[in-house]
Amino acid sequence: MSLSIRNQIAGTVTAVTPGEVMATVKVRLDGGQDITAAITLEAVKELGLAEGSAVKTLIKSTEVSLATGPVEGLSIRNQIPGTVADVATGGAMASVKVDVQGGELTAAITKDAVADLNLATGTSVVALIKSTEISLAAA
């Protein structure tokens, strides 16, 4: 199946913490970064997710925020360092490609944000992604 979601990075489940309705799933990406996805318990069961399961993380580009360094005092736990590989701007929005260990992330942010952060090829950034915005697919 083809998807419009550009951000698809492979990884391995390292832990599943079930709750009443939702579960947190910790994934070690192929590049070595650890991220957390918050998905329904039903999805965990349907996908058969357990420690050691191979998965693909799926993240819409509109759900990726960028910072010019690590951010403290924030509830967003998924902070992935990288380097800007490309910036394409339009009338109001921009697409920023970020090289991260093990792959690439694309962030759809405003043109004003690109200017305010002085983003250009080679800029060090941190991609910020809420755990509730990460989907998982069985690999």
Image (cartoon, helix red, strand yellow):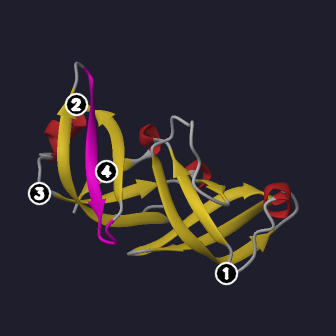
Q: Position of residue 115 (x, y in %)?
A: 85, 63
How many angstroms separate mark 2 from mark 1 (CA)? 40 Å
Q: Position of residue 49 (x, y in %)?
A: 15, 47
Dot 1 lies on which element? loop
Q: Residues within 10 Å of mark 1 (few under 14, many from 20)?
A: few
Q: Of marks 1 and 4, which one's residue comes earlier in the chain?
A: 1
Q: Residues within 10 Å of mark 3 (few under 14, many from 20)?
A: few
Residue occupied by mark 4: 136
Q: Looking at the rendered structure, which numbered label has been put on residue 41? A: 2
Q: In this rendering, which labeled residue sits more in front, label 1 or label 4?
A: 1
Q: Is residue 16 visible?
A: yes
Q: In this rendering, which labeled residue sits more in front, label 4 or label 3?
A: 3
Q: Residues within 10 Å of mark 2 (few under 14, many from 20)?
A: many
In the rendered structure, does residue 62 fall within the stretch colored magenta? no
Q: Position of residue 83 (x, y in %)?
A: 59, 74
Residue occupied by mark 3: 52
Q: Looking at the rendered structure, which numbered label has been put on residue 122? A: 1
Q: Of marks 3 and 2, which one's residue comes earlier in the chain?
A: 2
Dot 3 lies on which element? loop
How many angstroms separate mark 1 from mark 4 (CA)? 29 Å
How many angstroms separate mark 4 from mark 2 (CA)? 12 Å
- Report the residue at 65% width, 56% height from top: 67
- Report the residue at 42% width, 41% height from top: 131
